Amino acid sequence: MLYSRHAHLDCWLFFWSLVVAALNIRGRPARRQAKGLITVVGVLAALVFVASLLAQLQTQGSAASVAPTTLRVMPHTDVNPYGANFFLQWEAEPWKVEKTIQMAHEAGIGWVKQQFPWEELEPKKGRFWDDRQNRSTWEKYDHIVDLALQNGMQVIARLDRPPAWTRKDNSLREAPPDNFEDYGDFVSAVVSHYRGKIRYYQLWNEPNIRPEWGSRQLDPAAYVQLLRIGYERAEAADPNVFILSAPLAQTLERSSDAINDLDYLEGMYRNGAKNYFDILFANAYGFSETPDDPADPQRLNFRRVELSRQIMERYGDGGKPVWFNEFGWNASPEDFPPGALRWGRVSEQQQAQFTIDAIRKAREEWPWAGIFCIWYFRQAGQILPDHSDYYFRMVDVGFTPRLLYRAVKAQTAALSVAEPGTYQSTNPAVTTEGAWRLAVDSKASGGLLTVTEQTGDSLNIAFDGGGIDLLVQMGPEAGIASITVDGAVANLLPSDRLGQSYLDLYSEQTVEQRLVPVSNGLPSGKHVLRLSLSGNRNPASRGSRVGIDGFKVHRTEVISTWATISIVSGAIIIMMLLLYWWLGRPVVRLPDTRTRL
């Protein structure tokens, strides 16, 4: 409803004009006409009063039904849930890599799941150089990583596919190395090279099936050994990275070629896998079933992951999140040969709708659900249309968006602005510039802090609400941050001699969590909090560290339009009744004392 904030003044001017006119009425007939007019106006005002009260009650009821977002307390879950799998290493032309990343960014995709093939990066032991092309093997992957970061996207790096020099038997190129320590060296090299740029690493892929585990006996204990070595070497190279377990192929088979994924996960936990990963990575194809079809040990569907979750909790690992590696529905044509439908099939409309519904339901019902890497965004032409997996794509080889792309783009539009509620610092409404990193902290609200010590680094929070608080860590090595809201001072923070609002995070003792009110009284609409590390510090501080744990957005506190109208119309009714009474009084005629001539 459109409403002028001066409308109530117009009402009062109209009312007082009636009063003035009534006071100038002398004769009884004229007074009767005035009373009739006032009766009509009074009845209209009463109707407006009643209607506005009803509308106000309805508005309040509607507002009360929308609860503020509650904090997702598990680490790595308060994030942009939309990711996708990419095959950028197969692109021969750089512009196609750039266009693919650009389209993914425009769709709101926040995560680039990308393979970093060991065989391509380290063709000789300890040598990351392509002798044939006379250039660094890092070059192509550096370009991919930099493009993702420039577009505000994070990379999940898959590390597998060993080079031939790691094995005596090279009949299956996916097979693990003969010496697992070689894999540890490779993991260490990649993590060191991308320190500060890549935070999430997947160690191996689908070890419960051939050919991913080569000709070796499928053995969860052997994979746990590989996982342990990779985890320890990654942690040593960069303590701020997070390790994802190898996703398991969804299968009911129990043979020398495949082990049921639930059995294999149970075997991983029995062999101590719990200590060697931070996030469980799971495959979650929907096959031909809907997102609502229940989990069943004898069925393959999206909700089968609930059974994996039960295994995690049974082994005391319920504090870890689950991310989704290969996720989605296949939309092969109706006339596709049934024997070639390895992943089942649904229509393109169902593919788009099921994907959106599954992510929404999982985020509502599974507090442990994190990122969903849709299989897949776009391929470079290596998968032909006569193969069923051609029809998973969000975007065609020729860059034509499919229905799935448009559906995802429509859903992600609202992610970048936080509504009233409480959030982790990893929420997609938070964007950073500079050397910010995620630091593990068991006492933080989501187990993670967003931290920097670099002068000039900045952090932005986009929100829609009447106020905002920051959840921060304070301590003896903390610095001072300059803060603005919509480019102006934050009205709940002190200002320096230049009139700039700031937040001093110094404290003699470490304070793990301090909720600091930053700004209030903001009008409805989008606002941006900007925090910058100023370089100033408290004289007693030993450093300039800034640690952001999270933030809280408050509702906009306003008097509604309907409340204003009801107040004004109610006041007019009262005044109309008084005026009506005054006009109904007997007219007292004084004697005419004028001298007659």
Image (cartoon, rainbow, N blue to C red):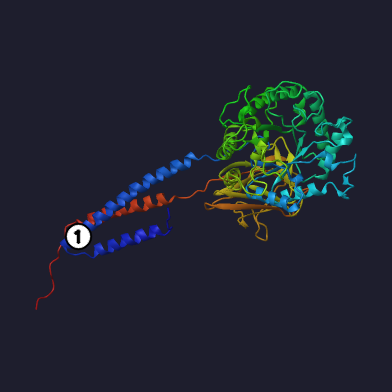
* Relative side of 461 to 453, left or right: left
Residue 33 visible in the displayed image: yes
Residue occupying the point 52% across, 48% down: 556
Where is residue 514? Give x, y as percent: 66, 42
Say which of 462 and 522 sits in front: 462
Say which of 425 and 229 sits in front: 229
Q: Residues within 10 Å of mark 1 (few under 14, many from 20)?
A: few
* Relative side of 237 to 296, left or right: right
Q: Give the quarter of the image for residue 549.
A: top right
Where is residue 201? Give x, y as percent: 76, 38
Residue occupying the point 87% across, 36% down: 164
Say which of 461 and 215 sits in front: 215
Q: Secondary structure at mark 1?
A: helix
Where is residue 239? Give x, y as percent: 79, 39
**Where 101 sits versus 116, above or below?**
below
Where is residue 234? Give x, y as percent: 81, 37
Residue at the extreme bottom:
597
* Residue labelled with disc 1: 33
* Relative side of 74 to 273, left or right: left
Q: Give the quarter of the image for residue 124.
A: top right
**Where 254 sits versus 503, above or below?**
above
**Where 579 sits versus 419, above or below?**
below
* Relative side of 180 to 325, left or right: right
Is the C terminus in the top left, top right, bottom left or bottom right quadrant? bottom left
Residue 445 visible in the displayed image: no
The amino acid sitting under disc 1 is Gln
